[in-house]
Image (cartoon, rainbow, N blue to C red):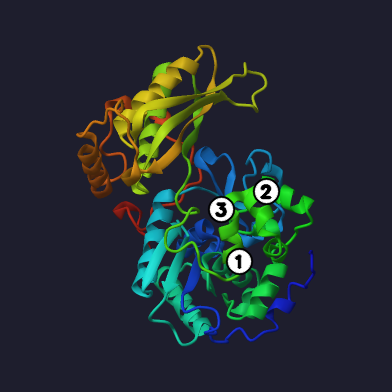
Amino acid sequence: MGNSITRHQIFLLNPTLKLTNSLTKKVYALVDCNNFYASCERVFQPDLRNKPLAILSNNDGCVIARSDEVKALGIPMGAPAFKFASEFKQHNVILYSSNFTLYGDMSARVMNILEANSPEIQIYSIDEAFLLYHKAQPKNYHSYGKELRYKVLKGTGIPTSVGFATSKTLAKVANKIARKFPVRTQHVYVIDSEEKRIKALRWLKVEDVWGIGRQLTKKLKYVNVHTAYDFTNLPDSWIQRNMSITGIRLKKELLGHSVLGTENDFVRKKSIATTRSFAPSIQSLETLEERVSTFAVTCAAKLRKQNSVCRNLLVFIRTSPFRQDLPQYRKSIILQLPAASNSNIDLVKSAKKGLKQIFRQGYDYKKAGVIAIDLCPADNLQLNIFDQLNDKHPPLMEAIDMLNERMGRGKVRLLSQGIGGSYWKMKQERISKRYTTNWNELIEITCT
């Protein structure tokens, strides 16, 4: 295990080879938008190109997106803005508040182009999508990937990287290579032979494999597994014992066998969280109830979107750990719902009940959150004789989702969410315009 290979040897093979029939007829592509949030800002502000650009989280708290220039400076993802203020100033890092209205609309435009140019698409995240080629396949995947990338760039201004392989996990690996070596790969890489698959896995660190987290990485390195190739050489018995069936599937995927399909365990979330920091901090129970109610509603909408329900809800509140001059308090509670649900009404009722149990007067609360746990598919729900489901909730939630989609998120709300107020406004001192969705903020071009 631990076979070494230089990062440039992987590209000695011809990147334009056609996919060999010896592997499989089914091919996946992963299209990933490069530095998506930063790229969205650069589309409408070309002067930001080639400059260090970082996007901040809600309330301008932490770095959630970095351009390549910021990554080169060693500023980590999640870096607290106040702690890195001197580095930002020293290296002239440009900061922007997160503009999810803009990013969401640009994402939809990218996905529409991909959908129009592929037989089957599965949107994985705001900036990633898997494409499936089964019956109708391009003659040359590298050329096809370059053409697909050009269409997205021309239609939206967003640069992408494309990876092709015979499984989703291998497509992820190919995409990493295309992203890491843009000059050699022209932003497109195809794992189309056994030799290229092995070299790719020897290059990829085990902690960078899709589905392997921090704790599992420690366990794997303890048994001298340092690369994805090392992982594929582990006995199935060890993987089954330490990673269950998920690990076996991952190994098969890395070997080039597609076992995840269009729906898989990586896509369906096992928990759904909505958390926010407050600016300014909150002292009253009434105000916290409005925030927590909205968090619960957001979780419920996400549950419905992936056709899931939850049996338990976790609610937490906490003060700021950075304000040691103030009294500190943090508390969480898990509540079991009367019956598994994805209804706004049910989740809000339980969330408010939990909040009242953990709330204490006399503290400045800086953050709160709601996490839906113990999820299961809504269409495969096992009930018992004591579960009491309200038949009126599903059609009501469907109507609310439809109205909010047409009129704008949050237009139809529960009364417990409040009717708005100054404390709802997030700290977004550096937010850009909503160039694509607001008539008053359309881009202006001056011709001379």
Select label 3 or label 1 by which is in front.
3
Find residue 348 and report its image quarter. top left
Q: Mark 3 or 2 closer to N-term?
A: 2
The answer to whether residue 422 is left or right of residue 97 is: left
Could you say where residue 20 lies in the image, as x and y percent from the top left? 55, 85
Q: Is residue 71 visible?
A: no
Residue 208 is situated, as x and y percent measured from the top left of the image, at: 65, 58
Residue furthest out toward the front: 237
Mark 3 or 2, closer to the camera: 3
Question: Which amino acid, by three-letter code, is at mark 2?
Answer: Leu
Task: Give the labeled residue for mark 3.
Answer: 245
322 vs 232, nearest the viewer = 232
Q: Identify which residue is drawn at 51% across, 59% down.
A: 36
Query: Which of disc 2 and disc 1 is earlier in sequence?
Result: 2
Can you see residue 258?
yes
**Secondary structure under the numbered disc 3 in the rendered image:** helix
The disc label shown at residue 45, or none:
none
Q: Provide the residue designation for mark 2.
A: 216
